[in-house]
Image (cartoon, helix red, strand yellow):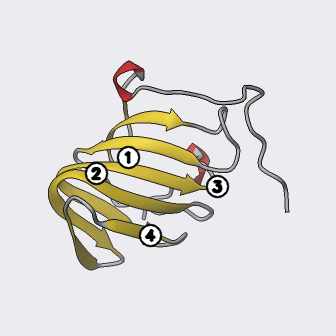
Amino acid sequence: MKEAKVSKQAYLVRKVDEIPRERSTCGFRKRLIAKEHFEGANFTFLNVYEAERHYHKKTTEFYYVLKGKGTLELNGDTVDLEPGVLVMINPGTRHRAEGQVETLIVGIPPFDPEDTFFD
């Protein structure tokens, strides 16, 4: 197993308000920690907006709800989202979030656009 590499800095501080917002499959995201910072995982702040159903073949995602309410569709099942809810999404699970929801997403291994698939 390949060991995860860490930035040459002893630490990294990121402020969500200083990170550019970009459109993603699930809404609007801000990449707090990306692959270039740490090869072991990514941390993304996401505002859900017009999410598309998709899946990943390699990445396990953890959605932690910070604010708002909505739902997460998982292989046809529906999970209610509200602050304090954590959902682990294993590779191969079709998923799509709906509602006015802000989440912190952790991806292991880190997000790779080539690992996003649509039916």
Q: Quick check: 49 left or right of 12? A: left
Q: Nearer the viewer, mark 3 or mark 2?
A: 3
Give the Cα distance between marks 4 and 2: 17 Å
Q: As shown in the figure, which amino acid type bears the numbered disc 4?
A: Met
Give the Cα distance between marks 3 and 2: 21 Å
Residue 6 place in picture, x, y as percent: 74, 38
Which residue is denoted by mark 3 in the rendering?
109
- Whether residue 7 is situated above or below residue 88 in the rendered picture: above
Residue displayed at 20% across by 57% down: 98
Nearer to the camera, 31 or 116: 31
Looking at the rendered structure, the secondary structure element under dot 4 is strand
Q: As shown in the figure, which amino acid type bears the numbered disc 2?
A: Ala
Q: As shown in the figure, which amino acid type bears the numbered disc 3?
A: Pro
Residue 113 place in picture, x, y as percent: 56, 44
Dot placed on the residue nearer the N-terminal end, 1 or 2: 1
Looking at the rendered structure, the secondary structure element under dot 1 is loop
Which residue is denoted by mark 2 in the rendering?
51
Residue displayed at 14% across by 58% down: 69
Give the Cα distance between marks 1 and 4: 18 Å
Q: As shown in the figure, which amino acid type bears the numbered disc 1?
A: Thr
Q: Are marks 1 and 4 in contact (CB under 8 Å)?
A: no
Q: Are marks 4 and 3 in contact (CB under 8 Å)?
A: no
Question: Which label is found at residue 25?
Answer: 1
Give the Cα distance between marks 1 and 2: 6 Å
Which residue is denoted by mark 4 in the rendering?
88
